[in-house]
């Protein structure tokens, strides 16, 4: 395995979080060390803003509220953050 560069690390982190979002779609999950590391990496590397990390964390760890649209909104929010991070990471690779 070759030495990871920031672009590869971003892709690894996003892949981990994409899998976490899929796992957390129906119910909250217990975050693994890999999820914590992925979020920390994206935050440190400037791909994710701190408020996005906090909101994603809430989405994967807390159950949706009692309103009928909450499960949809929770899933939608996770996907919005992942899509944004993919876009930002791709832009960073062009520098």
Image (cartoon, rainbow, N blue to C red):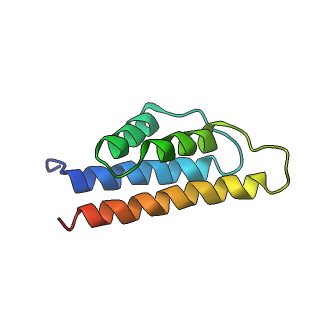
Q: Is residue 91 above or below residue 2?
A: below
86 and 8: which is toward the camera: 86
Q: Horizontal and vertical percent for residue 2?
A: 14, 50
Q: Residue at x 71, y 49 (%)?
A: 26
Q: Is residue 34 above or below residue 1?
A: above
Q: Is residue 63 above or below residue 81?
A: above
Image quadrant where one finds the C terminus: bottom left
The answer to whether residue 25 is left or right of residue 80 is: right
Q: Horizontal and vertical percent for residue 1?
A: 17, 49
The answer to whether residue 16 is left or right of residue 74 is: left
| Residue 37, picture quadrant | top left
The answer to whether residue 37 is left or right of residue 24 is: left
Q: Residue at x 38, y 65 (%)?
A: 87
46 and 8: which is toward the camera: 46
Total marks placed: 0
Residue at the outermost left position: 3
Q: Residue at x 25, y 54 (%)?
A: 8
Q: Is residue 28 above or below residue 77?
A: above
Q: Residue at x 49, y 43 (%)?
A: 51
Q: Horizontal and vertical percent for residue 10?
A: 31, 52
| Residue 27, picture quadrant | top right
| Residue 88, picture quadrant | bottom left
84 and 75: which is toward the camera: 84
């Amino acid at each position: 395995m070759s030495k990871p560069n920031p672009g590869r690390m971003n892709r690894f982190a996003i892949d981990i979080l994409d899998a976490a979002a899929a796992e957390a779609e129906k119910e909250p999950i217990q975050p693994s060390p890999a999820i914590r590391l992925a979020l920390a990496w994206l935050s440190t590397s400037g791909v994710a803003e701190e408020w996005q990390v906090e909101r994603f964390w809430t989405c994967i760890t807390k159950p949706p509220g009692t309103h009928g649209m909450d499960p949809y909104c929770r899933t939608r929010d996770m996907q919005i953050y992942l899509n944004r991070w993919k876009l930002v990471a791709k832009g960073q690779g062009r520098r």
